[in-house]
Amino acid sequence: MDAKELIWTKRVLFLALFLIAVSGLMLHYRIHNFINHDPAHPGFSPTYFLANLFPFIDVVLVTILFASKKTSVYGYVLNGMIVIYGTVFMAHFSIAELTAKSAPIQDWLIKSTIPDIGIAWGDFFVGKALYDLNMKT
C-alpha cells in the first residue's frame, strides 16, 4: 500500500469511527432522552443524562484523541473501555427487562440490546484498525 492509499484509508476509518459514534449518541438520546417532555413528569432526568455521557465522550474525546498519532493510543484505550462498559450496561438492561416480562426466546434476540452491542463493538474494531494503521506509519 503506497502513502496516498494509506492516508486515504486512515481518513475513511476516522470518518467511519466518527459517524458510528455520532449515530450511537443520537440513538441513545432518542431512547434515553434526559429532558422529559411528559407533562406528568416534566424536567431533567439525571439517570438518562448519564446514559448519554459515554456516547458523548465517544463522539468528542475519542474522536479528538484518534485525530493525532501521538494520542491515538489513548483514544484506543478509552474507546475500548466505553465499549466494555456499554456492553455490560446494555446486557444488564436487556436481561433485567426481558426476564421481568418472561419474554419468549425470539424477543431476546430481536427486542434486546444485542444489535446495539454489535454496533458498539463495530465502533471498537474500526478504532482498532485506525490505531493499527497509526502505529505502522
Image: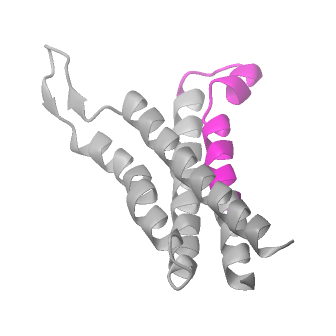
Number of disc labels: 0
Q: Which percent across, then down, holds residue 57? A: 39, 59
Task: Quadrant for the C terminus, please.
Answer: bottom right
Residue placed at 75% from the left, 21% from the top? Answer: 106
Q: Please provide the residue range marked out in magenta.
A: 100-125
Q: Is residue 136 above or below residue 27?
A: below
Q: Is residue 82 left or right of residue 109?
A: left
State the residue at coordinates (53%, 27%).
100
Residue 107: which quarter of the image? top right
Residue 121 placement (x, y as % from top left): 67, 53
The correct choice, above or below, for 47 with respect to 72 in the image is: above
Q: Residue furthest right?
A: 1
Q: Nearer the viewer, residue 24 or 1?
A: 1
The structure residue drawn at horizontal position 60% and vertical position 39%, both measured from the top left corner, is 116
Q: Residue 66 at x, y = what percent?
A: 53, 70
Is 135 positioned to the left or the right of 56 in the image?
A: right
Name the residue located 59 percent from the left edge and 45 percent from the top edge.
Answer: 91
User: Does residue 59 lie above or below 3 as drawn?
Assistant: above
In front of the other: 118 or 109: 118
Q: Nearer the viewer, residue 96 or 31?
A: 31
Position of 105 with respect to 114 (left or right) is right
Q: Position of residue 85 (x, y in %)?
A: 52, 59
Q: What is the image's colouring?
A: one colour
- Dividing the picture into quarters, in which one does residue 36 lie? top left
Magenta stretch: helix, strand or loop mostly:
helix
Q: Quadrant of the N terminus?
A: bottom right
Please say whether residue 117 is one of the residues in the magenta stretch. Answer: yes
Snapshot quadrant of residue 28: top left
> Is 10 colored magenta in this rendering?
no
